[in-house]
Structure formats: structure tokens, C-alpha cells
Amino acid sequence: MVWNNHENSNMSDQHDVSTQSAGTVTVPDPHRRRLLKQLGIAGAAGTTAASAPAWGGSTLLDALGGFFQDQYQRMSPSEIEAALARIERKAKRDLGVDIHCDNTPPQAGVVFGYALNVSRCRGYRDCVQACIQENNHGRDPSSTAYIRVLELDHGQMNLEQADQYYDPETVPVPGKYYLPVQCMQCADPPCVKACPVEATWMEPDGIVVVDYDWCIGCRYCMTACPYWARHFNWKQPTIPADQVNPDTHYLGNRPRPVGVVEKCHFCIQRTRKGRLPACAEACPTGARVFGNLLDPHSEIRYVLANKPVFQLKSELGTEPKFWYFTD
Amino acid sequence: MIRPVTLCFPLVYLILTMAGVASHAADPQAGFQGYPEAPAFTVLPREAPLKNYPCMRCHDFLKVKTEPRQLRAPHPELDHGAGRFWCLECHDPENRNSLRTTPPIATNSNEIHTLCGRCHATQERDWYFGAHGKRVGLWQGEREILDCVRCHNPHQPAIQPRKPQPPPAVRSGLERPAGRPEPVVPIWEQAVDGLEQPREQQHE
Ligand code: SF4
Ligand code: SF4
């Protein structure tokens, strides 16, 4: 990989930088951006503990540290730690909540897959609500949601004819069926190819993630995604303090800034710790099957081997790791 | 030299097999043994214990009446099997505490799937392997799943329609599309001239 050398040298450069004061950092790398970044980080890290009330907490230092923050994959462990601490402080300032933000790494030998039983789905949208709460989406009326449930006529597969705003007294409506759509975690994701700054990539466990701090908000990825799975934050998401989920992940459900793109990440903050995604947990009909594609005894492998499965728009060759099945 | 103990094993095995003890498959009384190749699981117990269990508290004193009729409370209304069913399809007439499976299980058992699976065998198989039903908690490690009766009321097993959660918001500055998408008229409801012709003419 291109980043390997880069990352190693970066790590040795950055080692113990927090113990040095900003004035005495010697920078072996002539790269200007790195110099600035190191200064920023050293400054932020060196004065984190000390209070600077004149600036309303450590806002200025955090702003500096954030400005010089590198892309996630290129950050050294100490840089990531500083970034996580900044996220936690920012949540405290903005939302008034003590959150915990980590960067739990992928598990070895695990690639996540999802299968959804179309014959069981009844269009309740319980998964949508669970996702909004789990993933710290804004609660104001125009905020984003990762899952769209499409209502389609029997005998139809034309997504242009689908209705995502259905709201009858009771579902399922006779003659209709329901097709929840979210990020398919494509094995060959066009969104990743479209991003001009490498703010989005596929992790080793198959989850396509976004570094919200590196995203420039150009929305190229949104046009590249064939499944309408990416969502843009037109406004700063606002969440009442008592509704914030404090258990967050850097690449997952941490509070996002305005002007960046986000998408379903298979509840990375839960699934990397062995838990089921919030949508699977919320589904009252058991239509959602989640698991490890590399485990031959997993439930999802049974579904793939024994049920009639299909992928959405499989002709595009994006190889979704999200299957639909019927029984 | 062969020791007597070594000789004993085949002998004991033979006797046991003939008695139908050693091999479950040979014994019809042992009933369905599940799918050994399915991943191991624990069934989460009922949320609340059955209210009127044990049934024999009352039924011990009541005569067994087998003709189907409308039952009063505390018996639930039955809407299972499209009118072809009656209590005694599942409940043992002689011992109301148990259900009619092989071997019989208690009505408040956590193994209800063995009863449901007598008719719904494909669903039961899928449930064993995880394609039907619901796993809770972790995708990794111990597999905890819900039994049939956690989602289906055994007396009215169809899941009832209900109000969906609110629809998604429309992004500020945009408007929700007026009206719903044009419904598609299925081909079988469209008038197709060619389909009206008698078969004989098409063959000529
Ligand atoms: S569904 Fe869309 S956002 Fe998700 S990986 Fe595929 S192209 Fe990317
Ligand atoms: S919006 Fe962000 S993630 Fe999407 S292509 Fe642009 S920079 Fe990349």
C-alpha cells in the first residue's frame, strides 16, 4: 500500500511529540503541511490539561488541532488519540454530553454481510427510528436517515415507482411490498472511486467508512452511489442532550459536522464489539440477518446458500454485501 | 490376548440397539432431534409465565369434550389454520398440561418450536439455521434466539398490521413530491387483444 512507509515514518516522527513544547519540535520532514500539523498537535496536546478559560475552554487549540488533523488512515496512534479527545471535548461543548469516542479496530477474519427477507418486511420503519437514535442523527425535521423503506407494487421492481413517503393508517398495505434500502457496503464501491480526497474507503472488515473530518463535502460520492445511500448534512445536526448516544466510534456515529457526507456503516461502533446493528435489533419481524461472511456456519452464509437471494442493481457490478431474499 | 472388557462393548451395543436405546433415529418415541449441523443456540425463555398454567388445575375435574365449539374465557379466541383447527390439534386431551408432540412437552415449555415445527417444518428448519426468527444481542459468540411464541401468538399467529413509524423528512428547501407515484397497472389488468383470442385459432 502507498501509505505504509508514510505511516511508519509518521509514527516515529510523532512519537512522544506531546512531551515536547511547540517551540522545540524539530521536524525532519520538509513537508510543510506536516510541520504545521505537528505544531498544531503539539500545541493542542501540550495544553489540553491546562485550562484556558479566555478561549472558552480549549476551543482555539482544538480548532488548531482539528485544522491540522490528517486523514484517519495516515494518523499515528497518538494523533488519533488526540483527535478522539478533541471529539469528546467538542461534544461536551456543543451538546453538553460526555460521550466516549473510540476507534475499535476491525476483527481479523471478519467481513460483514447483511441479508434482508423481503417476504417478512412489513414496512414498519422501526429500523429507521432505531438507526436515527443509535447513530446520533439530528432530530430536527429535515435531518438525514441512513435507511429508506421503499413501498412498491406487487409484481414491480422499478425503483423509480417506489414511494418512500408512504404513511397509511396500517402497514402492510394490500398489494404492496416493502424494500428497505441502505448502504450496501459494496465490495467494489463506486463512491470510494469518486472521492477526490480519499475521505472514504473500505475497511478490512468490509465496511465503507467516511472520515468526516477529511471530507470536503463535494458530494461526488453521492452521485456515484447507485443506491442513494449517502447523505449530506445541510445543517448542523441538533440532538437533545438526553437523546445523544454516548457510545461512539470515530468512523461511525460520532457527532458529525455540517457540510459533510455520511452513510450507514453497519453500526461500526456496535458490530466491531460483537453486537448486532441497531436496525437488526429493532426489526420486529426478524427480517434482518447479519453476520460474518467468512464464517461458514454463520446465519448469513446459510441464507446465501439456501435461499433465493438477489442484490439490488447487481448488473452494475458494485458487488453489494447486502442481499435480499425471499422464502 | 483379548480382554473380556473389550469383548463387552460390541455385545452391550448390540443389546442396546435391539432395545432401541442406543440410536435415537431408530426409536420413533425419541421424536425429532433437531438439526445437529445447525449452529448451537440458546432459546430465550418466555417474557412472562403462562397465566393459567398448569391447565390440569381445572381440567382435572372436567370431562374431556372433543366436539369443536366456542370456548369462553379464560380460553383465547382461536384464529389458526383457517378454521380447520380445534384446541385438541395441539393440546393433549388427556393431559392438558402438555402439548401433542413426540415426546410430549409441557405447555409452558421453552421448546415450543418442536410443536410448531410439526406443520411448519420449513420455518422450523430455517429457524434452526437462522434464516427465520430473530437473534438478539450479539452476532458473535453465544447465539441467543427467540422462540416462535415470542413473535407469534399461537392462537392468532398472523402478525397484525399496524401504524408505521413516521415517514422521512424532506430536506429543507425542497418539497415532498405531490401525490404518490403513478400506480402501475399490472399486465393482467390491462386489456390485451392478443390474449382474448381462442386457443384453436392461435395454433392454426
Ligand atoms: S451502497 Fe453506495 S455508499 Fe454504500 S458502498 Fe455502495 S456505492 Fe458506496
Ligand atoms: S463528499 Fe466527502 S466523501 Fe464524498 S466524494 Fe466529496 S470528499 Fe469524498
Image: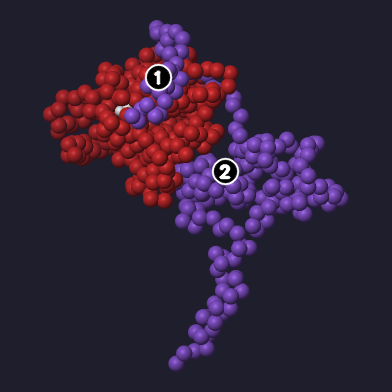
Give SS at disc 2. strand
Residue under disc 2 on the same chain as residue under disc 1? yes
Residue drawn where x is 70% and y is 37% of the image: B78
Give SS at disc 1. loop
Compared with A2, A132 (above or below) is above
- Determine which residue is flagged by label 2: B146
Compared with A33, B56 (above or below) is below
Cβ(mark 2) to ligand 1 < 8 Å?
no
**Residue B109 position in % (x across, y down):** 66, 50
> Which residue type carries mark 2?
Leu
Of all chains in the rendering, the one displayed in red is A
In the rendered structure, the residue with mark 1 lies on which chain? Answer: B
Residue drawn where x is 13% and y is 29% of the image: A30
Of all chains in the rendering, the one displayed in purple is B
**Residue B48 position in % (x across, y down):** 69, 41
Crowd band around label 2 with a 10 angstrom C-alpha radius: few (<14), some (14–19), many (20+): many
Q: Residue furthest left?
A: A30
Residue drawn where x is 26% and y is 33% of the image: A317
Mark 2 or mark 1, which is nearer to you?
1
Q: Are marks 2 and 1 in contact (CB under 8 Å)?
A: no
In depth, the one of A219 and A114 nearer the eye is A114
In the rendered structure, the residue with mark 2 lies on which chain? Answer: B
**Residue A279 position in % (x across, y down):** 47, 32
**Residue B130 position in % (x across, y down):** 48, 45
In the picture, measured across the screen, residue B170 lies left or right of residue B121, that is left
- Determine which residue is flagged by label 1: B192
In depth, the one of A272 and B81 nearer the eye is B81
Coloration mode: by chain
